[in-house]
Structures are given as structure tokens and as C-alpha cells.
Amino acid sequence: MAIVKMNKISLIGLESDKERILENLMKLGVVEITDPKEKISSDEWKDLVDVDGDGESVSGLDAQIDRVSAIIDYLDKFDTRKKPLFSSKRDINASELNMILQNQDKLWSVINSINEYEEMLSNLKAEKNKNSNLILSLRPWEALDIPLDLTSTASSTVLIGVVPEMADTDKIKQDLSDTVPESYCEVLGKDKEQSYLLIIYLSSKEEDALNVLKQYGFSKVTFKDLSGTVKHNISQASKTIEKIDKDIEDIEKKIASYVRYKDDLEILHDHLAIERERKSVLVNLLKTNKVFMLEGWLPENSSEQVKTLLEKSSDCFIEIIKPGEDEEFPVLLANKAFPSSVESITNMYSVPNSKELDPNAIMAPFFILFFGLMLSDGGYGAIMTILAGIILKAFKLDEGTKKFMRLMVYCGISTMLWGLLFGGWFGIPNIPALWFNPSEDPELLLSYSLLFGAIHIYVGLGVRGANLIKDKKYLDAVFDVLFWYILFTGFILFVLPYIPKVDAESVTGLVNLGKYLMVIGAALLILTQGRDKKNIFAKLIGGVSSLYDLVSFMSDVLSYSRLLALGLATSVIASIVNQMATMFGFNNILKIIAVVAILAFGHIFNFAINALGAYVHSCRLQYIEFFGKFYKGGGTAFEPFKAKTKYINLK
Amino acid sequence: MLEIISGNFFAIFGAAIAFIFAGFGSSKGVGLAGEAGAGVLTEDPGKFGPVMVLQALPSTQAIYAFVIAFLTIQKVVAGDSLSIAEGFILFAGCIPIGFVGWISGIFQGRVAAAGINMIAKRPEGLGRAIVMALMVEMFAILGFIVSILMIGKVA
């Protein structure tokens, strides 16, 4: 039984015991507490009870969690320790946790000082920016050697400013000296956009001088609050930047020294997250003045244990009952290692609902075989198996990654198997095949691909029948499964001569049998498929239109031709890589390096793109062609009330 | 001038057609999906994995066409010319994957881009996004198989 049977639990306890009971439930981690929304809106309950809840502490804890996790992320940048490729949660026991929590104040002061340093850093960076901008704006004026705050003498005016790049500076000089002989003009610099000018003139001739300059689009530039020469100001600013850089470095060193608290901060984070979980579950509790009540689901086989444990530790009333015949319950899957490896693929489509068979056990072998057939190169399969095996052995992985790696091992083994059958190993030519070589005879593999598809679809229909029998709808199983089998089998036999590599003459008997089966099947379907319609005509029309499913059966089977296409693509590209590499020859060391590089790159690329292809296409065959036949899904996953941590495992 | 119109010429011409058009389709498709992907990644760099998977999907058209082009070129043996009829069969055999790959690559890229935008909002929709993109891929696969079967007629 792959879907775990659930029981319903109702618990009534004293308000004063609430904390302890919830803590016990959390430790057990096998009870999902459900939302009492329906109950509270019914008249019977509305006046009796209120919904519990502690929104204030939840939001308070949320704020704390955000702060701690922001600091952890920030410290991560300074953490120079080597990170493992696959991170896993650390095991922490209760006494270690308590020790760290006793030092909570210390951790919070660490957080505060890191926050202060962060602010100082951002101030310093702003200051640095300001100075670098100043340097940028002063650069063009570097040639100016009179102090910036000197704008006039007793009788003359000193002016700096810019004209657009296209203005002819020689002409400005000429014009100015013609109109106002008592003037001086110097071009200090020029860049892509403008020319930088210094102009000195007799103050009494200001109007004339400005008139000339205006014609050339001159605009005045002033540097407020600056004194001394440009060079002096630039060197001042650079000195400030140097100092700021040093300060930043100092502060970063100080922050880096806090990295040693990161592990403790992670524990604090998870401790707060557990607290939050315990507070936020309160909204699912009902309460009166003195007592509280909760309802939920728990696996059948842990019912007794939960009941005795809770009743022993506190005075409470517990009732555990089986769910009603039609009641949906949350779905927990309990599978052996092999089927559980494809659970994530099924869940990506939909979680099974509580009333149907768990499809994983029956889907796993198909997924893995089809993957292998589409990757089809035994060498790639071996590499996949070895890599995934090493990762499984060497790293401590979380449950999801572990299942995925196990799937990769199975898929790798299946790929090796197909490699043996087809003689495909890294695209090396002339390795004998146990069965046949698909690139020499693609039509044969096409026929077999379609055969595999038909088998897959038949199994899918079979599961539909099993589901119907499980629901005690025996007649439906006959009408909706057996009759289709008759029609489909008839159809397959009928079209046999058109399948490549089938000898048309030797199958004439089967074709005749197919004709009869098709007629019988179609007649039976026309009579039964419209059975839920009201009058006799609607029934017949419903029956006839259901025959359209024969077309979708045909297109479903043809869809398995991708098994051939992807398998062939891998082997052909692998052999192309080999040919391109060996084109160079082996007569000197450089050529050998080129050969090795092309082989490595080519095969890695081919493996990556085709493994991805095999994976997604194998998924698709399950989702559309297989699940389409029987799978309803739409269940909700079982989410027990337990400590949800990010960094640690509490022991 | 007439000498070059040989069986070899048609075969090579076909290989070029197969890859050029399917390559167009894949380039455009992967490009479209990549633009959508870059947009999503600016918001959430953590989605690189699923975005990459979706972006890679429209590249298969070019790969199928590459295989077809290669198989066709292999039939051309230097010095020993194919007959005009054989060359023509090879030429015709290259057309399905070339043209179907071209159009399906572009549209698969559009579906993949839409899928990428979908997983930006609902990461759990990855399975559905991939399946929708693979619906388009089916036609490229059929084109590939038709091409393979046609080329197989020339020994």
C-alpha cells in the first residue's frame, strides 16, 4: 500500500496544558492540524467557541527571523570556509541548543554590531562616491593653476567655463582680443563634448566680453566651497579615498571576525522558526475560556502511539476515528526505494488523491526504461551511475536529493543495459550489439518504439480498471477498460501490415482477427459509452462519438516514436564527435591534446543535452500518454505539524 | 555548368537546407526563451536551473537537423557520384526536418518563454511548462523520423 491510510483525530484539552500538548505533538511530528474554518461557521459551533491565535507573537517572531536570516546571508559573503557541494542540516542535540540559547543576548549584540558596521560601510561608500565624482569633475581643469576661489582681482575678473566641442576656440580667442583687447583667453583642455576655457578680462569691459562669449555658447562653471588649486583639490580627494578604503577594509575585517558566530546564528534562526511554527498553528485551534480543541489527521499506524503518549503526559480527551467512505484525506506516500525515486516526478504533475492507487510503483520501471532507451549510450550510462553513486555515498544529502540521485543510478543502469543491446558505447563503431544497431536499422526500432508505447498505454488502461475495481465499479471496469482493450487490440492487428519491418503476408490471419475484434469492440462501445445520457438517441450519439478516442490512441502510440528519435540522436552525435576528433591524427603532442579536448567537450555536451532530453521526454510520456489514461491526482500532500528547520536537525 | 548538377550536388544542397532552416528555428526559439529567462533571473537568480531547462528545449530542432545533415553528407562519397535520382531522394529527405524544425523551433521558443514567465510566478508549474513546450517538439520529432526514413531509402 503506497498511500498511507489516515485517521481523523480530535483532541480537547485544558488551556493550561496547551503549550505542553503542542510541544509533544511537534516532537511526534505525525499529526496534521486542520483549519477549523468549516466548523466555526456552522451554527452549532459558532456561539460555543472562538478561534485561537497569537498574531502578535507570530509577526514579532517573523521580524526577528528576517533580521537573523539577513545577517546570516550577509555573513555568508565573508565566510571563507569551504562549502560542501551538497549542504545538509547539522545534527544538534538539546544540550547544545540550550547552551547556545543561553548566550542569546550575546548573539543579538553581535547582530546589532553587524548592523551598525553595515551602516558605517554604506556611509563610507557614499562618501567615497562623492569624492570620486569630485575628482572626475575636476580632472578637465587640471591645467588651471590659479586657485579656484580666486574669481576677481582689484580690476579684473577671472572666469572659467565651457563651450561646446564644435566651437572653434581659436576664433573665440581672436574675437575676444579684437573686441576686448584687455583680456586673456586660454584653452585648458578639450574632450569629446566640450572645450574648457580660462578667461580673464578687465572688469569694466565685462559686458562686451560676455557678449562675445555668449555667441559661442559659453557657460560659466563654478566650484563652490573649494579653495586652492585644482591639483591640490584632486590630491586631497584621492587622499580621502585612500583613507576611506582603509576604513572599509578595517570594518570588513571586523565583520569577518564575526563569521565564527554564523553557525550559532543559524541555530538561533531555526530556534525562532520552531517557535514561530508553534505560535502560528494556534489559528487552527478552537478555544473557550478554559479548554481548547484541535482536529487533524494522522497515519493509521501511529494512532495508538500518539494517543497513549498524549494521554499519559496530560489530561485530555482524544478521539481517533476512521474517515468516512467518501472523505478525502491528506496524502502521505510510503514507497520502497525503487518506486520512491520517481515520486518527485509524479508530484510535479500532481499529488495523487487519497482514493486512487499510487502510480509511482507502476510508473517507475517505465520511466527508467524509456530514459535509458532515449539516452541509449552505455558509456554515458556508466558515467551517470558512477557519479550519482559517488554523490550518494560521499555526501550527506537531504531526502529529496537522495531520491533524485537514486533515480539517476537506476536510469544510468538502464542506459547501460540499452547500450549493451544496441552496441552503443561513446559512439565507438563496430562494437557488437546484443540485439541490433538502431542506426543501421532505424525502422526496426521505430516499430519496437511503437510496441513499447502500446504496452505502456495498455498498462495505463489496466490501472484505470484497477482503480474502478477498487471503487467496486465492476461494470464500469468492463465497459471502460475491457471494451477498449478489444477495440485497440483489433485496431493494432488491423494495421500490422503497415508497420515497418512486418511481413504483410505472414500476418493476414491476424488482420482478419483484428477486423472482427474491431467490429465487436466498436459495437460494444457504441452500446455502452453513452450510458449516462438520458434518452436512447443521446446514448447512441454518445457511444459513437466516443470512438473518436481511437484517434487519440493512435496519436498516443505514434508519440512513442520519440524513443527512436532521441536514441538515434545520441548515438549519431557521439560518433560524429569521435570522427571530428580523430580527423586531426595523433602524430604530435599538440594534435593529441586537440583530440582529447574535442572528445571531452563533445561527449560532455552530447551527454548533457541528451540526458536532459531523455529526462523531460520520459516525463512527458508519463504525464500525457500514461497518466492521461487513469490518473486523477489533485490530492493534497500530508503536512504534519513539526519543527521545520533550515540549518539544523534537532535530536 | 551542367556537370555540377549531379546526385552529390542535390544531396549536399539538401543537407544545407535541413540545417540552415532548422538552425534558424532553434536560434530564434532559444533566443526568445533566453530573453524571457534573463528577465526572470534579474528578479530571482535562484531560478537558473528551471529557466535553463526551458531555454534549452527549442535547441533540439537544430540537433535533429544536424544529425540528418550529417547522415546525408555521409552518403556522398568523393569521386563516386550518386545518381540524380538518389540525390533527389536525399534532397527531399532533408526538407521535412528543415522546415518543420524551423517553424516548430520558433513556436516552441515562444511557449518556452511563456513557461519561463509562468514559473517566475509559480515555480511548481515547471512540469506543466515543460510538457506544453514538448507538445510543439512532437512535430519536430515526427519531421526528424520522416527524414530518417526517407534518407534510409538510399543505400
Image (spheres, rainbow, N blue to C red):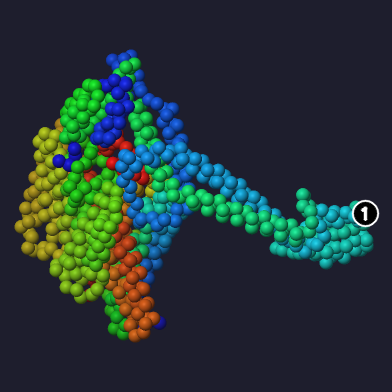
* Mark 1: secondary structure: loop
Look at the image and tell me in which quarter the N terminus of chain A lies.
top left
Residue at 26%, 21% in the rendered image? A12
Q: Amino acid at mark 1?
A: Ala
Look at the image and tell me in which quarter the C terminus of chain A lies.
top left
- Return the x and y of residue A623 as percentages of the image width and height: 25, 48
Quadrant of res A194: bottom right
Q: Which residue is mark 1?
A: A154
Residue at 10%, 36% in the rendered image? A474
Any part of residue A92 in sight: yes
| Residue nearer the viewer, A496 or A612 | A612
Query: Left or right: where does residue A269 sit relative to residue A136?
Result: left
Residue A183 vertical placement versus A5 (above, below): below
Residue A330 vertical placement versus A72 (above, below): above
Residue at 93%, 54% in the rendered image? A154
- Return the x and y of residue A221 as percentages of the image width and height: 78, 54
- Return the x and y of residue A363 as percentages of the image width and height: 19, 49
Query: Left or right: where does residue B85 sit relative to residue A168?
Result: left
Query: Left or right: where does residue A209 sit relative to residue A65?
Result: right
Q: How many marks?
A: 1
Quadrant of res B12: bottom left
Label 1 packing within 10 angstroms: few (<14), some (14-19), many (20+)? few
Any part of residue A324 in sight: no
Give the chain of mark 1. Answer: A
Residue at 34%, 85% in the rendered image? A587
Residue A490 vertical placement versus A630 (above, below): below
| Residue nearer the viewer, A521 or A445 | A445
Q: Residue farthest to the left?
A: A509
| Residue nearer the viewer, A55 or A312 | A312
Residue B1 vertical placement versus A624 (above, below): below
| Residue nearer the viewer, A299 or A394 | A394
